[in-house]
Image (cartoon, grey):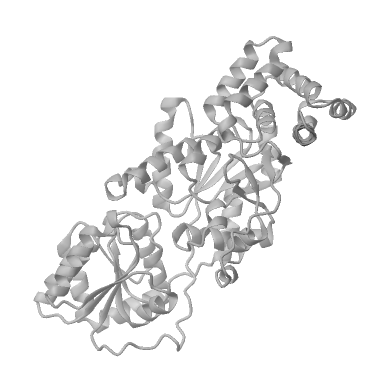
């Protein structure tokens, strides 16, 4: 072994000792013993940790010790094997179980030369997607608006998953800006913004918040953390569309979501973005007694809508035809084909109007819709699809719209229709789920999304009646106001247990 090899070996030994030092205060009782073991090296140190963890036989300490030794969060089947193997081993064999676990988890290693920090009594938030990507729709808007305020008011530990590993780390400066100040970040040249050095974060007796839906490969370690670590896991419940309306999404979305449910069922709290979304998670909870589980505590923290200003830059369009607007991703459940059918009926009646769809979509979702659009355009119909629209196009469209139409068959919240109403634009929307919740505050005509005649009649009414449009416009302007500050404060209260409530639970 040459000098470089020796140096590398010594460095790795030092990293193992550092990780064991982080968990020693929770596993060992004597600080002086910890200091002595650290001086003796990783072998004696690990042996004492292993014997103590085996003797205490507590899931949270077992998870913590395995995580620290591996430098990654274990998946459920590895944890179960590890716990059983410890229970079967003789005391002098306990360390060997740790070493074998290391070989079994080798595919999860990014680098053995890593440190970690155990954080207790902390709030750790997984914002991996928003930290790594510049997408700014739906969930990303919710996460960024919320984290901007949480960072200001509570300063939680914002984290991402280390590439090539299964462990959380703190954000780099560029990643942090992408999460809490996206407006500034989006004006800069793209920079991944990773930290120069990585220190894994291991929550213990803490709260882990999941405001995003994690990618499929991360669900297994999160499920083990939720079930075994003793941490509180809280999440935002957006919807269960990939299983409830599986026929309207690509198959891989359903597969991803059912993996996510392995995390949900062991979590502590879910805050739905609407009453309808909360009821979907309640339905999942109702199935869990079959596994002897109760599921998470459910609450509803409805999303807010703050209307962007429609200033003079968003000028009137030259076309005199009234504009019927629909904004949202182009996928089957948005029911755009029903809008097209209703529009065709009205065009054949002699009604004169423009129809504009704004939104994106993948080929799986748009292929039939795009064919129907081209057919209508060949017949001379005044219909257009705008994809990749900037804020200027979107706001100009809102400014010029006579009314908004959004008869979706399933939404977790229905942000597009809520935004239209916040701007004072009358809306036609569905009479069920979260869309009915939004409509209850005024400014809407509701229809059965599966009844083409109802949709056609509602569009006809708003094309023909200036009085009805004015009435709904007044209702829209009178709707209750709700801000991102309101939402963020209520969400924190729902997902992050206070010290007092934690103490009450412990006393009970």
Q: Nearer the viewer, residue 12 or 323?
A: 12
Where is 358 relative to 1, above or below? below
Where is 343 relative to 73, above or below? below
Residue 138 x/y as whole percent = 44, 60
Q: Residue at x 12, y 71 (%)?
A: 345
Where is 234 relative to 29, above or below? below
Task: Tell me which corner region of the image, top left, top right, bottom left or bottom right, holds residue 204.
Answer: top right
Q: On the picture, is 128 further left or further right than 337? A: right
Any part of residue 143 in sight: yes
**For the view shown, which residue lies furthest in the front direction?**
2
Q: Residue at x 25, y 74 (%)?
A: 384
Q: Nearer the viewer, residue 59 or 134?
A: 134
Which quadrant is home to the N terminus?
top right
Which quadrant is home to the C terminus?
top right
Q: Nearer the viewer, residue 494 or 110?
A: 110
Residue 156 x/y as whole percent = 67, 53
Q: On the picture, is 424 further left or further right than 381? A: right
Q: On the picture, is 184 further left or further right than 290? A: right
Residue 482 x/y as whole percent = 51, 67
Task: Tell me which corner region of the image, top left, top right, bottom left or bottom right, holds residue 117.
Answer: top right
Q: On the picture, is 3 further left or further right than 243? A: right
Q: Residue at x 37, y 46 (%)?
A: 253
Residue 85 x/y as whole percent = 61, 15
Where is 313 relative to 291, above or below? below
Any part of residue 456 in sight: no
Q: Residue at x 39, y 54 (%)?
A: 412
């Amino acid at each position: 072994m040459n000098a470089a090899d020796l140096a590398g070996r010594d460095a790795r030994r030092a990293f193992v000792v550092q990780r064991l030092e982080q968990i020693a205060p929770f596993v060992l009782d004597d600080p002086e013993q910890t200091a002595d073991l650290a001086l003796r090296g990783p072998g004696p140190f690990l042996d004492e940790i292993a014997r103590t963890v085996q003797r205490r036989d507590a899931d949270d300490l077992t998870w913590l010790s395995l995580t620290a030794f591996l430098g990654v969060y274990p998946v459920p089947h590895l944890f179960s094997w590890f716990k059983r193997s410890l229970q079967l081993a003789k005391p002098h064999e306990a360390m060997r179980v740790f070493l074998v676990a290391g070989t079994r988890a080798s595919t999860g290693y990014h680098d053995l030369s890593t440190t970690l920090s155990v954080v207790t009594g902390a709030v750790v938030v997984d914002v991996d997607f928003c930290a790594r990507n510049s997408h700014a729709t739906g969930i990303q808007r919710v996460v960024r608006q919320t984290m901007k305020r949480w960072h200001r008011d509570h300063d939680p530990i914002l984290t991402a998953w280390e590439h090539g590993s299964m462990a959380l780390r703190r954000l780099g400066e560029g990643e942090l800006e992408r999460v809490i100040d996206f407006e500034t970040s989006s004006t800069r040249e793209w920079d991944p913004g990773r930290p120069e050095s990585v220190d894994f974060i291991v929550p213990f007796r803490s709260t882990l918040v999941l405001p995003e839906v994690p990618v499929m490969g991360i669900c297994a370690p999160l499920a083990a953390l939720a079930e075994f670590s003793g941490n509180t896991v809280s999440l935002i419940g957006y919807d269960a569309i990939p299983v409830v309306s599986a026929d309207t999404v690509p198959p891989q979305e359903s597969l991803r979501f059912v993996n996510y449910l392995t995390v949900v069922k062991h979590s502590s709290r879910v805050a739905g973005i609407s009453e309808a979304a909360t009821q979907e998670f309640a339905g999942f909870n109702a199935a869990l007694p079959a596994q002897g589980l109760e599921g998470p505590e459910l609450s509803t923290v409805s999303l807010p809508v703050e209307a962007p200003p429609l200033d003079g830059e968003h000028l009137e369009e030259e076309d005199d035809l009234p504009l019927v607007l629909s904004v949202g991703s182009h996928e089957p459940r948005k029911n755009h084909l029903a809008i097209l059918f209703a529009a065709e009926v009205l065009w054949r009646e002699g009604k004169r109007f423009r129809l504009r769809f704004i939104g994106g979509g993948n080929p799986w979702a748009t292929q039939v819709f795009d064919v129907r659009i081209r057919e209508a355009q060949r017949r001379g119909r005044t219909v257009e699809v705008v994809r990749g629209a900037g804020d200027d196009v979107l706001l100009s469209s809102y400014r010029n719209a006579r009314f908004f139409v959004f008869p979706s068959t399933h939404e977790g919240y229905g942000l597009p229709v809520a935004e239209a109403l916040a701007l004072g634009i009358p809306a036609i929307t569905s009479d069920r789920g979260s869309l009915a919740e939004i409509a209850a505050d005024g400014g809407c005509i509701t229809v059965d999304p599966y009844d083409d005649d109802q949709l056609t009649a509602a569009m006809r009414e708003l094309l023909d009646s200036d009085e009805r449009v004015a009435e709904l416009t007044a209702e829209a302007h009178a709707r209750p106001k709700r801000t991102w500050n309101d939402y963020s404060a209520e969400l924190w209260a729902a997902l992050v247990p206070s010290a007092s409530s934690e103490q009450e639970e412990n006393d009970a």
